[in-house]
Image (tube, grey):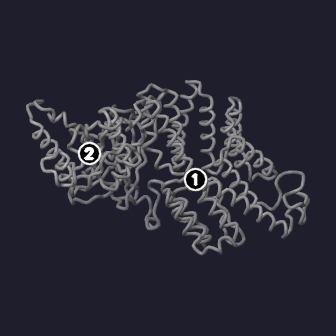
Amino acid sequence: MSFVGHIRDLAAARRELETRRLLVVGGAPDADRSAFLDAVAREVADEAGLPVYRFRVADAGERSGEAGRTPGEAADAVVEACRGVFVVHPCVVVVDGVPAGAADAVPTGTADGSLLAGLISAFAESESFLLVGSTDAREDASALPSDGCADGWALLTRAAVHCDRGDPRAAGPLLRRAVEAHQVAGDRRGEAWAVFLYGRMCRLRGRPEDARRLLHIARERFRAVGETPGEAWACGELARLATRSGAPDPDALAEARRLHERVGDRRGAAWAHLWWTVARADEPGFPWREEFANVQGRFHEVSDRLGTAWTLHHHALTLARTDGTDGTDGVDGTGGTAGTGGTAGTGGTGGTDERRREADRLFEGALALFEEADCPHGRAWTMLEYALRSPAHRFLNGEWAAEIRHVFHGIGDEAGEAWVDLAEAGPSPDGEPPYELACRYPIALLDTLGWTETGEPLIPRAARDTQPEPRPGFPRPGDRDRPDDSRAQVRLTLLDDVPVPDVPARIALQVVPGPGHPWSTAPLPPLTARATSLGHAEIDPAHGVPADGAEFRFTPHRPGSHRLRFTVEDPATGTVLQQVEAEIDVVPSDPGPHRPTAPAPRPSARRA
């Protein structure tokens, strides 16, 4: 624990807090300072899955004569309130309203009687995070913009940048705060864009059902406020969802492109044109050379480096995987006549070498642009495909796989790391995909995985569109010898419509034994199901008995994604039989009735 001082930048404050677990903020009026503290607390708490507790010194009678307490007595009351459960159990504690001077140039543990020193002492051995707000207002009030709507748009911009970089984890907390900011400001257009980006983030994270629901909601809200460009973007993202199953929908992408063009959104039209071209690039006879060149020209017109980089990436990928024909009736890229048979269609060995050199140039151009645009997701995929298609490039660098794996790891893309592992290991003797890919991607997509004659993988294009997490309940290799019907599983069912903030929603928990499980022919024992909220929500009661029909009331206090943990125990032996986690999305002001799917449990290694 250590004293930090006056901090006004949210990113710097968050880094300090994560490093030292103590942040002292001053130099702003009450409203701005409190908003800043709340923003930092929410961002850290959402990512770490911790609860937030808030104290105001004034509430403890800090002001002289209030509630009959002296300032010293009020300070003692605040310190004592922060001891115990808030110190023993990790959480984020915000103490605001510390009087001027109490947080000014105080070395750790040397200011006897100081409220700040007392708080530092109380949290010295804690795993909790402590934020302190001082009323010292000698500096300017620039902690946070006071305009909630403008702040919401800034948050949306930051979230969109994280999605473009391929780091959707960092976008989640920003989008939750953006939704709140636009709601408070009454900005329906901003709220629609926040819901759209939240749906896009879910697509990136490999959660198609959540993405589809949110993108449909966003599209309806865009229509309601007359935001046609947003409607076109939502249509395009919905069409891209189909690629995850290995069945792209080029017609829907073409319609999104027409919508963009109708409203003069040249950048949106360029992106829709790119994904339409990618969806059709592997069709026999499709003129992919011409289309990729047209898309590249569109992106140049709007100065979109990221779009240009992905265009070069897919152009190079298509070039490296073809036999020289490009679906046109003219000459191919090697000077031979396409589609005439013999060596003219393939260009012979010389044509193959020329195509490889051209693909190398395109990959190198894409890699340079991804680096300029600070997009590690695109950079990692381009490095991987370049290494696979250019043996000379790969063998010059003996650590090629480790380097690419490191870039994927930097954005938390475990799926990308799994593709690197596959490229290193080569095809499986039994033809089955490795577990780390099988548990993340649909079978239909993995069925499109191919191999070259030299043993290099032809990774499906759609694999780079998402960063999917392991599917809940997918059997691990050690479980495959154990029949599914011999296990008991936890089933969670959301009994009400889409949860909204501060309104209880019912969740039913059942233990469902398989046909081969002993409980299938005998009454379920009196197990205990313990419920825990890992964010800004309450869940009641804390315990339930599945045999009697365990039902819990989930009350979220903010929109966004909420995690819940359910632990099933045998009270007779004190054994934890299974622990599952579920994610529930809370979307404010759902325009229509909706019956969501059951929250998907995440099983732990311990199973009943």
Please give left or right for residue 97 compared with residue 413 in the image.
left
| Number of numbered discs overlaid on the protein picture | 2
The residue indicated by pointer 2 is 93
Q: Position of residue 520 (x, y in %)?
A: 35, 54
Image quadrant containing the C terminus? bottom left
Work out how far the residue at label 1 is from the one at label 2, CA to CA, in angstroms: 35 Å
Q: Which mark is residue 589?
A: none
Lower sequence index among marks 1 and 2? 2
Can residue 316 be seen at all in this image of the molecule?
Answer: yes
Q: Position of residue 194 (x, y in %)?
A: 50, 36
* Residue type (three-letter) at the residue carrying disc 2: Val
Q: Position of residue 601 (x, y in %)?
A: 40, 50
Please give left or right for residue 422 compared with residue 521 in the image.
right
Please give left or right for residue 595 compared with residue 85 in the image.
right
The residue lying at 21 percent from left, 60 percent from top is: 573
Q: Which mark is residue 375?
A: 1
Q: Residues within 10 Å of mark 1 (few under 14, many from 20)?
A: many
Residue farthest front in this picture: 138
Q: Position of residue 37 (x, y in %)?
A: 32, 41
Front residue of 475/100: it is 100
- Asked whether the beta carbons under mark 1 and mark 2 sit within 8 Å of each other, the answer is no
Front residue of 265/139: it is 139
The residue lying at 28 percent from left, 51 percent from top is: 22
Image quadrant containing the N terminus? bottom left
Can residue 523 be seen at all in this image of the molecule?
Answer: no
The residue lying at 16 percent from left, 51 percent from top is: 111
* Residue type (three-letter) at the residue carrying disc 1: Cys
Front residue of 270/19: it is 19
Q: Residues within 10 Å of mark 2 (few under 14, many from 20)?
A: many
